[in-house]
Image: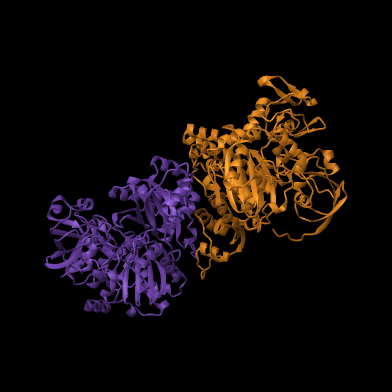
Chain colours: A orange, B purple
């Protein structure tokens, strides 16, 4: 989007003392990354992970609420800030923590779609009408439409508001339009209060991004748990609940997610200091089941062969049709899906990754309870979904947990020493998906896990951490936190399903893994995985680690693009129509591939990967 | 509309023994009138007035419910039927009651618009879909749209119905579309049940016409009182009520009229033996206040200078937005208006009268509580509204009543003898608007009322019927029913207002009354007035009586046209945009014209009218 009054300022990066020139007003994290600085940020600007912290040795901005939440008071004083939540304001000296190991891959700007135009389709029009006179008896509606310059539909609730609104304001007011429909009448002084929100409804997490639609700026981000978790952890258990309880079951599930979205929106609005009733557009992504449940459309068919969903194309409706607590006539756009298991979240990710627009062979992965895979081969696209199970979200693991305080989220083995990185200041309470991935990868690399996945004692000093035997054998990660043999088996099921899906996709497209130019990792958890670990467990076929690019929460990013630019809809439609969906459960060779892919890499393969590094 | 399998049959008209050829399937009343037979029918096919009765001496059709309601059993046996409610079925001998006096003017077919095309925009599509299979995992919505041949919006309630409807019917069902929107899913066997209803919301009377949208036939007609009468008799008193009671007042008024319309629709549906939920389109006309109240849009501004309404253009919405008890997603079209006092009822009448489409000077009158006047001068159109008061509806008259059983509706003085025609079998209970008009006209003609409106005793034998004196003087019409001096004064106010409006219109257009080619009398009461009487009281300027044409309930007829043909909307828009509205209360000369026009014609003028007859 165009920036007014931008200024070029000099920033010195410490400890390297490298000088760079940045534009004021730009997001600091984005600007630093563009200048080649490797700054982690798994939450991708949601202000929730705290990993993008930098220290201002000169020119520190005023700390904001998130800064105060993440840092202690001394840290704030020393200049620590979250780079994702500050804009470039002026010259500064900034200390960027040197990255040991690739905690996060750079989002290179040429891999993703930036909003071409800020054109959300929501506009506000301050009007000064002439009141009716003896020689001007025109109807209120005509008066309004003519002042607007024509062409606007007036829905019934606005008709009802109109006579009083005109007369109370003495015919001076602002009109909010969404597309060609008048959705609100505002007293003149509120004329700039128009907002929009992009929502990503995950099975586990709801993420929201609030935008000021007047200036195009993101003004708040927030994430919450999906309240449907109380019913079940995955889509199938929720569908089963709905079926068992009849119509009321699905109504209950809808009411839970609506409640969650409304609460999330309220937090976003509170953070930005606005009223939720000033939100006039909402874009929504999520997997097909989540979106069926949001609409209270029975998703039962998704759970049963042949897995046909009710909905595929996008749906546009008014907020009050669903019971969303934003402006009653706000336009709500549910983005389109490809199939019953490749949903709007993936389509949004494809949009954000600009998939199919480059002459390259690219693989987009979204790793979660389901692992969705899209393979683009010079414009042709294939998609599938694998039931990876909840291991990557920390569930089904003996001490598994979400990526919250106390979770081991990184495991390094270096010079025969084990280092577990724990989220937050306190000790380890459990292990989350990325920690599990690292643990298996590192233990396989040093040989304490063999290629079949079995924990085994070797001469390696860390063998001492292996306790118990038989089915009860386990590895001590940190005080009181173990990786069990069963956890490794669960992990193998999950990674095997995804790898088998990748193999089927490659076969469908008639290409080899060596042909892959790039692997884009998207999804809510996408940027939390270490690319090396994905290779060392064999979740990905052996490719150069540099080919792996993290997109962050690509679903949320795609929802933001749709919020910002109404002209993006045809591209979404093109994506869903041009992508060939492959139902893995109908592919004969899938089960044998799955069994094979549960294996971890052989010793030779591991050696090869280490040599290439 | 095109008829399939029509056949020409010979009908002998008694007592003249004239033979005519008619097409089977056509409405009998319309066919007889087209053949020059003068058959009254003030309710214009609503089956409520009973005046279009004919006697089949051969070939009588099976009596229907209305026949049984209007005729005694012996009459049915002798062949009496209501001609408006039967189609031509086969050869017959039909006795048509010779008309003494012009009870009703012929509706000559070249004066009105016939539906050019039967194209209501509602269609039913029987579909046989293929269920999802392993090699066809398309979404339900895609399956449906592709079977429909593309291009249909699916609103949320249909999305919610879809998965169950498809599976319960084993993918064989019918889809009802209104315009490009799917509004219902039907089990296959009901596939032809699509209906539409045209509603005329009068201040006093609600009239409804039910059509089978499958074959284009009218299947039921009914009229009821507007339940808002309990609040007030005219629009101003209802607006005042709403204002005094605040928002709840208008909500109450809306709820009353909705209740009335729903009850009317239920009766129509019951008569036709259908479910109200099979009605997918409704067109609504009425005066602006009635339509504002229907929508619960505050009409206060209509009651206060400068009388600007909130609404002018038509409004299309879904039945469930208003709470109408028809198919929830049925399309409800509120027809457009010209100003705060010239409403959709008049625009519908203009449409029906095909006003402005002929190279002629034509005057359209709608006589009710308000008298609306439209003057078309070779394509240019002027409209105004006069506050005639409720005299023409029988109110404000000492023994006034609606045109119901017991009302004197015709008064003739012939050979010095007075004949009062009373509605129904019983004696006179009061006098309705048309009776009042006749009474004043006839008494003025024989000189018992002078040109100033004063009752006076002369040598005429009927002078004996004048009783009392001074302000209490009155004329005995029938046992116990009197026309009082005050009634005559009320009548003069009403007719004076209309005549003054006509004079202003003529002045605006720069034409003389002698230039008028045709006067079209529309409105709910239009066809109940005797043209001669309109001349003899001077409500109309002196013109040849042959120039006066009754249109029947032109508002209802226009609503029917809009129901039958969706392509008529642009014509309505053209009518409202091209008609110049004249606000009489802002015309200086109006009051002096009004006072002058309260006078009745002079003796010379009466003589002249009698000579011309």
The correct choice, above or below, for B526 with respect to A83 in the image is: below
Q: Camera-side residue: B341 or A20?
A: A20
**Which residue is pictured at 57% across the width and 64% down the height?**
A148
Q: Count of labels shown?
A: 0
Q: Camera-side residue: A280 or A550?
A: A550
Question: Which residue of the protein is positioned furthest toward the front in this rendering?
Answer: A604
Residue B118 image-quadrant placement: bottom left
The correct choice, above or below, for A107 with respect to A452 in the image is: below
Q: Camera-side residue: B608 or A595?
A: A595
Q: Examine the rendering and report whether any part of residue B561 can be seen.
A: yes
**Could you tell me residue A282's position as x and y percent?**
60, 49
Q: Camera-side residue: A83 or A70?
A: A83
**Could you tell me residue B164's position as x and y percent?**
43, 40
Task: Answer with left or right where residue B612 lies relative to residue A389.
Answer: left
Task: State the quadrant of the N terminus of chain B.
Answer: bottom left
**Which residue is pictured at 19% across the width and 58% down the height?**
B89
The correct choice, above or below, for B163 with respect to B422 in the image is: above
Q: Examine the rendering and report whether any part of residue A284 can be seen.
A: no
The correct choice, above or below, for B540 with respect to A255 in the image is: below
**Which residue is pictured at 52% across the width and 47% down the height?**
A312
Task: State the quadrant of the C terminus of chain B.
Answer: bottom left
Task: Answer with left or right where residue A82 lies relative to residue A255.
Answer: right
Task: Answer with left or right where residue A122 lies relative to residue B252.
Answer: right
**Could you tell me residue B487's position as x and y percent?**
31, 63
Task: Answer with left or right where residue A570 lies relative to residue B14.
Answer: right
Residue A21 image-quadrant placement: bottom right
**Could you tell me residue A106's position as x and y percent?**
74, 47
């Amino acid at each position: 989007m165009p920036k007014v009054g931008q200024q070029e300022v000099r920033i010195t990066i410490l400890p390297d003392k490298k000088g760079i020139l940045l534009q004021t007003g730009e997001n600091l994290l984005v600007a630093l990354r563009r200048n080649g600085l490797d700054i982690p940020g798994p939450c991708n600007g949601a202000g929730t992970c705290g990993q993008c912290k930098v220290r201002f040795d000169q020119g520190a901005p005023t700390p904001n609420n998130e800064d105060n939440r993440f840092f202690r008071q001394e840290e704030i004083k020393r200049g620590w800030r979250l780079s994702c939540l500050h804009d470039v304001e002026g010259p500064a000296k900034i200390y960027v923590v040197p990255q040991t190991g690739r905690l996060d891959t750079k989002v290179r700007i040429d891999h993703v779609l930036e909003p071409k135009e800020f054109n959300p389709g929501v506009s506000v029009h301050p009007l000064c009408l002439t009141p009716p006179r003896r020689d001007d008896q025109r109807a209120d509606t005509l008066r309004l439409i003519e002042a607007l310059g024509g062409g606007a539909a007036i829905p019934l609730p606005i008709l009802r508001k109109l006579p009083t609104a005109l007369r109370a304001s003495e015919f001076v007011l602002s009109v909010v339009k969404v597309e060609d429909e008048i959705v609100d009448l505002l007293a003149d002084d509120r004329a700039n209060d128009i907002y929009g929100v992009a929502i990503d409804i995950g099975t586990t997490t709801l993420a929201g991004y609030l935008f000021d639609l007047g200036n195009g700026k993101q003004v708040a981000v927030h994430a919450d748990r999906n309240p449907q978790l109380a019913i079940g952890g995955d889509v199938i258990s929720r569908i089963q609940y709905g079926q068992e309880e009849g119509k009321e079951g699905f109504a209950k599930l809808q009411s839970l997610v609506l409640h969650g979205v409304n609460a999330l929106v309220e937090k976003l609005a509170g953070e930005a200091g606005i009223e939720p009733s000033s939100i006039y557009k909402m874009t929504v992504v999520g997997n097909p089941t989540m979106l069926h449940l949001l609409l209270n459309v029975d998703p039962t068919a998704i759970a049963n062969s042949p897995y046909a969903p009710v909905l595929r194309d996008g749906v546009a409706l008014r907020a009050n049709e669903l019971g969303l607590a934003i402006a009653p006539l706000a336009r709500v756009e549910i983005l389109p899906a490809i199939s019953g298991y490749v949903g709007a979240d993936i389509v949004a990710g494809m949009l954000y990754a600009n998939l199919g627009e480059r002459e390259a062979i690219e693989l987009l992965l979204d790793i979660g309870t389901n692992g969705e895979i899209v393979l683009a081969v010079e414009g042709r696209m294939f998609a599938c979904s694998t039931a990876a199970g909840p291991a990557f979200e920390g569930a089904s693991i003996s001490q598994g947990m979400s990526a919250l305080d106390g979770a081991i989220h990184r495991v390094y083995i270096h010079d025969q020493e084990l280092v577990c990185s724990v989220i937050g200041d306190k000790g380890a309470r459990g292990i989350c998906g990325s920690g599990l991935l690292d643990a298996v990868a590192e233990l396989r690399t040093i040989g304490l896990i063999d290629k079949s996945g079995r924990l085994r004692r070797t001469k390696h000093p860390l063998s001492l951490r292996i306790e118990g035997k038989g089915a009860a054998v386990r590895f001590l990660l940190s005080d009181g936190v173990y990786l069990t043999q069963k956890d490794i088996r669960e992990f193998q099921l999950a990674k095997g399903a995804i790898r088998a899906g990748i193999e089927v996709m490659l076969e469908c497209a008639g290409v080899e893994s060596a042909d892959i130019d790039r692997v884009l990792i998207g999804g809510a958890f996408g940027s939390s995985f270490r690319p090396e670990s994905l290779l060392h467990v064999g979740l990905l076929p052996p490719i150069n680690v540099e080919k792996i690019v993290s997109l962050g929460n690509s679903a949320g990013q795609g929802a933001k693009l749709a919020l910002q630019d109404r002209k993006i809809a045809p591209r979404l439609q093109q994506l869903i129509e041009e992508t060939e969906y492959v139902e893995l459960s109908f592919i004969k060779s899938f089960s044998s591939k799955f069994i094979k892919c549960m294996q971890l890499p052989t010793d030779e393969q591991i050696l090869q990967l280490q040599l290439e590094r």
